[in-house]
Amino acid sequence: MHANTKRLAANVPCKVHYRKQVQTVCDEKKLTVAFYRSRSGAEPVRDWLKSLPIADRQTLGRDLRLVEMGWPLGMPLCRPLGGGLWEARSTLAGNRIARVLFCATRGHMVLLHGFIKKTQKTPEDQLNLARRRQKEVDL
């Protein structure tokens, strides 16, 4: 456990300061992360995360853990994209922005697609890919 992390009694709400805003989270997961797996067995989000530098992986991991513990969350950490699709928002070193698109289903946060954002608006092709994967998960 990190030196600055306080251990809480199970299911006791705790306020976490995130990007100058307060988010309420518990010490018990409300969602469990699951990676989208293609029919061929590939896990593209896991592969993408492994390709990132360790500092970026740690930032994304911290942010995804906050979503797991505090679900449902809103801005600035999560934003709904419609149709049950959400984005987890992370700011990486060097003023880069990462997004992990996911859906919440049956107690799981299924990570559908991850990418580094290069434009202000989320590219339509990124959204379409996540929506196609979401349809496979919802079967």
Image: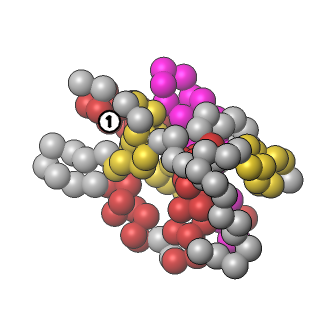
Provide residue 77's location: percent of width, then percent of height: 68, 45
Between 10 and 86, which is closer to the camera in this rendering? Answer: 10
> x, y percentage for residue 114?
46, 51
Q: Is residue 132 visible?
A: no
Q: Determine whether 10 is above or below 60 in the image.
A: above
Task: Tell me residue 97's x, y (percent).
Answer: 64, 57
Front one among 74 and 119 = 74
With 121 as the anchor, is 39 left or right in this view? left
Q: Is residue 49 above or below residue 35?
A: below
Left or right position of 36 against 7: left
Asked if residue 132 is positioned above or below residue 70 in the image, the reply reads above
Residue drawn 76% across the image and 53% down it: 16
* 87 magenta-colored: yes
Q: Secondary structure at mark 1?
A: helix
Q: Main secondary structure of the magenta part?
A: strand
Dot 1 corresponds to which residue? 133
Could you say which is closer to the camera, residue 73 or residue 84? 73
- Disc 1 marks a residue whose amino acid type is Arg
In the rendered structure, which segment of residues is drawn in magenta? 77-94
The quadrant in which the C terminus is found is: top left
Would you identify the image quadrant in which residue 103 lies?
Answer: top left
Residue appearing at x 45%, y 33% in the figure: 104
Residue furthest out toward the left? 40
The number of numbered discs placed on residues in the rendered structure image is 1
